[in-house]
């Protein structure tokens, strides 16, 4: 079976999903560094930034919570793209198999 080329839309979708997931992962790492940084909380810039984000957005999510959300969104977008492309490839394979079967029957007659 020959290899299918990756379309531009598929590649752009994967890049966007990867950037979203990478942003979520970086938020989670930033939170972990902020928690374990050996500095007082009043002097910790990461903890201060988390508190400012929580008060500005009026949502009780720190960087870890936002990171999990962004990571999940990135994975879901990539999964949707993957399933869509897989369905399209399956339809193309079935179409080619039916065509080959019809041509085989015509040649036999």
Image: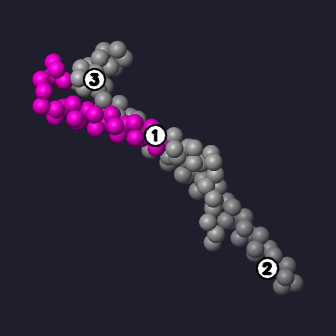
Q: Position of residue 13 (x, y in %)?
A: 56, 43
Tell me the quadrant of the picture where the N terminus can be found: bottom right
In which image quadrant can residue 5 be found? bottom right
* Badge 1 element: helix
| Part of the protein shown in magenta | 17-44
Q: Residue furthest right?
A: 109
Look at the image and tell me whether residue 99 can be seen: yes
Look at the image and tell me whether residue 76 can be seen: no
Against 89, residue 98 (above or below) is below
Tell me the quadrant of the picture where the C terminus can be found: bottom right
Q: In the image, which is nearer the foreground, mark 2 or mark 1?
A: 1
Q: Which mark is residue 19?
A: 1
Q: Position of residue 67 (x, y in %)?
A: 35, 34
Residue at image mark 3 = 50
Give the left or right position of residue 31, taking residue 82 as reference: left
Residue at image mark 2 = 104
Give the left or right position of residue 75, taking residue 109 as reference: left
Marks 2 & 1, CB-CB < 8 Å contact? no
Mark 1 vs 3, N-terminal side: 1
Mark 2 vs 3, N-terminal side: 3
Q: Position of residue 80 (x, y in %)?
A: 53, 46
Q: CA distance from mark 1 to mark 3?
A: 21 Å
Q: CA distance from mark 2 to mark 3?
A: 67 Å
Mark 2 vs 1, N-terminal side: 1
């Amino acid at each position: 079976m020959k290899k299918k080329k990756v379309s531009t839309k598929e590649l752009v979708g994967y890049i966007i999903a990867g950037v979203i997931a990478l942003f979520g992962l970086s938020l989670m790492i930033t939170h972990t560094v902020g928690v374990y940084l050996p500095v007082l909380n009043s002097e910790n810039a990461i903890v201060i930034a988390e508190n400012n984000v929580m008060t500005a957005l009026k949502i009780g999510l720190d960087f870890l919570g936002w990171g999990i959300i962004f990571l999940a969104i990135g994975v879901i977008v990539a999964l949707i793209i993957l399933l869509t492309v897989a369905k399209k490839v399956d339809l193309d394979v079935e179409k080619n198999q039916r065509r080959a079967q019809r041509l085989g029957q015509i040649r036999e007659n």
